[in-house]
Image: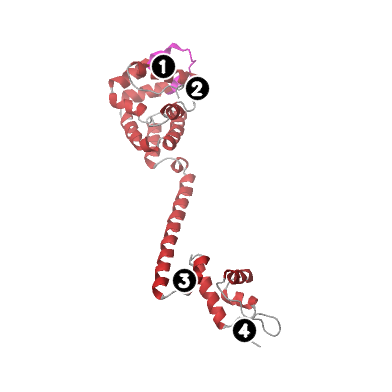
Amino acid sequence: MRNGVTIGQAAVFVGVTVKTVRHYHKLGLVEEPERDSSGYRRYGSADLLRLVQVRTLAAAGVPLAEIGLLLDADAALFATTLADVERQLTERIEELIARRDTLHRLADGDRALLPDRAVALLERMLGLGFPADEVAATREGWVLAKALVPEGFDDYLTHFEHALEDTRLVALTQRAAEAAAWEPDDPRIAELATAVADHYLANPALLKTVTGLQARTEAAIRYTLIAHHGEEQTPAVARLAALFEAKLRAAGIHIPRPDSH
């Protein structure tokens, strides 16, 4: 009779399940001991040592497919393989940390979808007296812009930041927010569109807040999705935007048309 312990005892001693031990056998990581005269497989000290080695390497993140070769490797290959596993684990840790940070940002609302700089500008808009609905619409438009035109979003924020320092523009923008409640045929809409367009044309740097998000490809589609987001709920603002863009086009500024392809 061979001295040793049963598979159940071996699993308990090593700290794994019987199913895990059998899986190690199936993969060829640990040889199955021979059965004794009673028909039981008996695990000796060498078997237990091998189980501990496999379990330890697996717990450290070494793929099961590599453990057999690793245990049979010389010292140099063993060290190289462990270094590679460590690198992979570091990458996984960094990925998990990034996911955790995203969860934290999700709890903070805007910060999950927009960079801190954009969130700060939205907070600044509220501080300047912009209506909460206008700030919310701006936030949604920026989320779209960041997704559709990521390569130009940071520059756009720079232009927008400068625009917030223009007191005349801020006043006109706040007036435009008030126009959301007007009737679409209100004559004040055309007057406001002219005033806003004239101010932009008199200050060319401001035009970058309008043209800065035009993508190199599919410009009309992307620009329309961003610039006209939410306008189906505010007919007056839709008309104001259409008149404003028409005046810029008339002055030679390239603005994609909603119906162009």
Q: Of the numbered discs in the image, which one, if any, rests on residue 95?
A: none
**Which quadrant, please, contains the C terminus?**
top left
The quadrant holding residue 244 is top left
Could you tell me which residue is drawn at 33 percent across and 33 percent down? 161
**Amino acid type indicated by mark 4:** Gly
Q: Which residue is mark 1?
A: 243
Q: Is residue 180 magenta?
A: yes
Q: Which residue is mark 2?
A: 234
Disc 2 to disc 1, C-alpha distance: 14 Å
Q: Which residue is mark 3?
A: 70
Choose mark 3 or mark 4, whichever is in front.
3
Disc 3 to disc 4, C-alpha distance: 26 Å
10 Å neighbourhood of mark 1: few (<14), some, or many (≥20)?
Answer: some
10 Å neighbourhood of mark 2: few (<14), some, or many (≥20)?
Answer: some
Q: Is residue 130 above or below residue 71?
A: above
Choose mark 3 or mark 1, whichever is in front.
3
> In the rendered structure, are the residues bearing label 2 and label 1 in contact, judged by CB atoms less than 8 Å apart?
no
Q: Which residue is mark 4?
A: 4
**Amino acid type indicated by mark 2:** Thr
Helix, strand or loop at label 1? It is: helix
Q: Earlier in the sequence, mark 3 or mark 1?
A: 3
The quadrant holding residue 196 is top left
Q: Which residues are magenta?
A: 177-193
Helix, strand or loop at label 4? It is: loop
Q: 123 or 203: which is nearer to us?
A: 203
